[in-house]
Image (tube, rainbow, N blue to C red):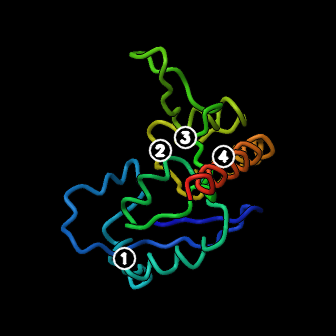
Amino acid sequence: RVSIIDWEGDVVLDKFVKVDEAVTDYRTFVSGITESDIKSNDAITFEECQEQVVRAIEGKVLVGHALKNDFNVLKFSHPWYMIRDTARYEPFMKKDPTDKDALVPKKLRDLARDKLGMVIQEDGKQHDSIEDATAAMELYKKARRKWDTAVEWKFNRTNAIRENQE
């Protein structure tokens, strides 16, 4: 399933995606996705999914959680300075219990609860990708000024380094 919302929380894209490979476990208890969802006439092909996602996010800041996974599945990338990944934003991360100098991502469910007072991904209930997208967007909104300032500084610093190398 691919789900995208806008700044206001309105759904921009929410489609089930047909798969070419045999599915051995839909993990419906977690994903909420069933065989009939991806075999329905409303489901789109992988190629259609890629096209629709690229069209929806082109030139826009992309907000989400653990977006590397989405990029790997969709087989595309987005400019680093246009990505706000709540799994990779340091103030949202936690210390690695095995390496005191390293940080690891917190679960979106924990961030939503701790930072927003929002309950998502409840045990025993199916995940809702729109709800997850909303939580990530609200987390970004909460940290936007500081986050965007940090990205702008990194962007400018990167460009300055490149210019000095030329």
Task: Give the side of residue 104 with respect to residue 13, left or right.
Answer: left
Residue beneath disc 2? 125
Q: How many marks?
A: 4
Whichever of callouts 3 and 1 sits on the residue coming sooner in the sequence is 1
Q: Measuring from the top left, give residue 58's x and y in whole percent.
A: 61, 74
Q: Which mark is residue 88?
A: 3
Q: Nearer the viewer, mark 4 or mark 1?
A: 4
The C terminus lies in quadrant: bottom right
Task: Give the camera-side residue of 48 and 22.
Answer: 48
Q: Residue at x 54, y 70 (%)?
A: 14
Residue beneath disc 1? 46
Q: Which quadrant of the view contains residue 89?
A: top right
Q: Give how far apart the Cα atoms at labels 4 and 3 are.
A: 15 Å
Q: Give how far apart the Cα atoms at labels 2 and 4 are.
A: 39 Å
Q: Residue at x 37, y 67 (%)?
A: 75
Q: Which quadrant of the view contains residue 83?
A: bottom right
Task: Give the camera-side residue of 50 and 40.
Answer: 50
Task: Give the camera-side residue of 92 and 30.
Answer: 92
